[in-house]
Image: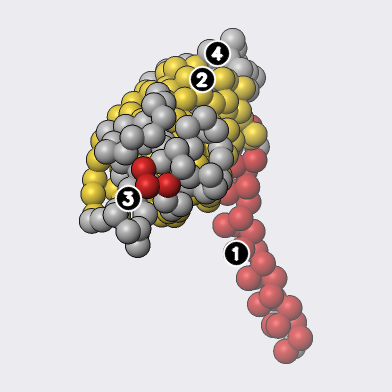
Amino acid sequence: MYGFLRLYGCNGQRMKLRKVIIPIVLALFSPFGMKGQEYRFELGLSGGMSAYMGEANTDKPLMDPNLSYGLMGRYNLSGNMALKAQLDVVGISGEVGEPADGYFKGENIGFKRNLTDFSFMFELGFSNYGVPSYMPGSSWICPYLTVGLGVTGYQSDKKKVIPHIPFGAGVKMKALPRLNVGCEWLFNKTLADDLDYAKGSTGFQLDNSWTGTKVWNKNKDWYSVLMLYVTLDLWGTSSECYR
C-alpha cells in the first residue's frame, strides 16, 4: 500500500510538471503553438563585443575588443519595419603606446571603462519578415538597416550623460516560429571627446586640445558594438490564420 501511494505521488508530480512544461514547449517550438497569429512585440537578450574609436584608435573598428551585453525590445510596425529599444553595458579600452612622439608631450597613456548605452532606433528590413507557412510572401530571414538616437552614461573625470547617434546593419531569422536570432553591428557617434579619459595621467588627455595628426574622428569619440541576440515573440495581435 505504501509503495502504491509513493508511486502515485511521484506520478502525480510528474503529471503536474507535464501540464506546465508541455504548453510552454508547444508555444515556443511548434508552429501549432502560434495558432496562426501575428506577433508585434519581441523581448530578448544580446551579447557580443565592443570597441572604441578616437584619438588612440583612428581606423580599426574592432581594435582591443571588450565585452558588451544587454536587453532588447522590438515593436514590429510591419513585416519589414520596426521600432527597437536597447539597454546595453558596453566596454571600451585603448592605449597610446610606442612610439608616442606624434602626441603632445609624447606621453603614453591607456584607459578602460564601461559605458551604459540606451538607444531608440528605427529598423528597415529588405524582406517581409515572418513564417512563410503562415504568411505567404514572408521570409524566415531578413537583413536590415537601423538608425536612431540614444544617450550614453559614463565616468571620466566626473559622471556624465551624453547623446549619441547609433546606426548600423544586421540580419535576423526565425530559428523557431516564435524565437528570433540575429546579428547586428552598430556604430555610435558620440558628442563627447573624453570617452578615452585616462585616470592618473599627469595632465595630458586624448581630447581636442592636443596637436597630433588630424584625423576624421579626432574631436569626437566613437564606439562600435558587434552583437548576437535572441528574442521571443510575445504580443499576439490576431488569431487569423494566414494559410
For the point 41% across and 30% down, the residue is 213
Mark 4 residue element: loop
Between the C-alphas of marks 2 and 4, the distance is 8 Å
**Nearer the observer, disc 1 or disc 2?**
2
Are there few (<14), some (14-19), or many (20+) residues within 10 Å of tag 4?
some
Q: Which residue is mark 4?
A: 127
Gap between marks 1 and 2, in whole Å?
43 Å
Image point (33%, 35%), residue name: 211
Residue 213 makes an appearance in the image: yes
* Residue 127 placement: quadrant: top right
Q: Regarding mark 1 in the picture, which secondary structure is present there?
A: helix
The residue mark sitting in front, 3 or 1, is 3
* Marked residue nearer the N-terminal end (4 or 3): 4
Which numbered circle lies on residue 204?
Answer: 3
Query: Residue 75: image x %, image y %?
Result: 39, 30
> Where, by quadrant of the figure, is residue 2 drawn?
bottom right
Q: Does label 1 or label 2 sit earlier along the sequence? A: 1
Cα gap from disc 3 to disc 1, whole angstroms: 66 Å
Query: For residue 144, which numbered disc appears in the image?
Result: 2
Q: Earlier in the sequence, mark 2 or mark 4?
A: 4
* Residue assigned mark 1: 16
* Spot occupied by residue 160 in the image (x, y as percentages of width and height): 23, 49
Q: Label 4, label 3: how many angstroms apart (C-alpha)? A: 50 Å
> According to the image, what is the colour scheme of the structure?
secondary structure
Q: Nearer the viewer, mark 2 or mark 3?
A: 3
**Depth check, front residue: 155 or 23:** 155
In the displayed structure, does residue 243 sit left or right of residue 204?
A: right
Disc 1 or disc 4, which is closer to the eye? 4
Mark 2: few, some, or many residues within 10 Å (few <14, many ≥20)?
A: some
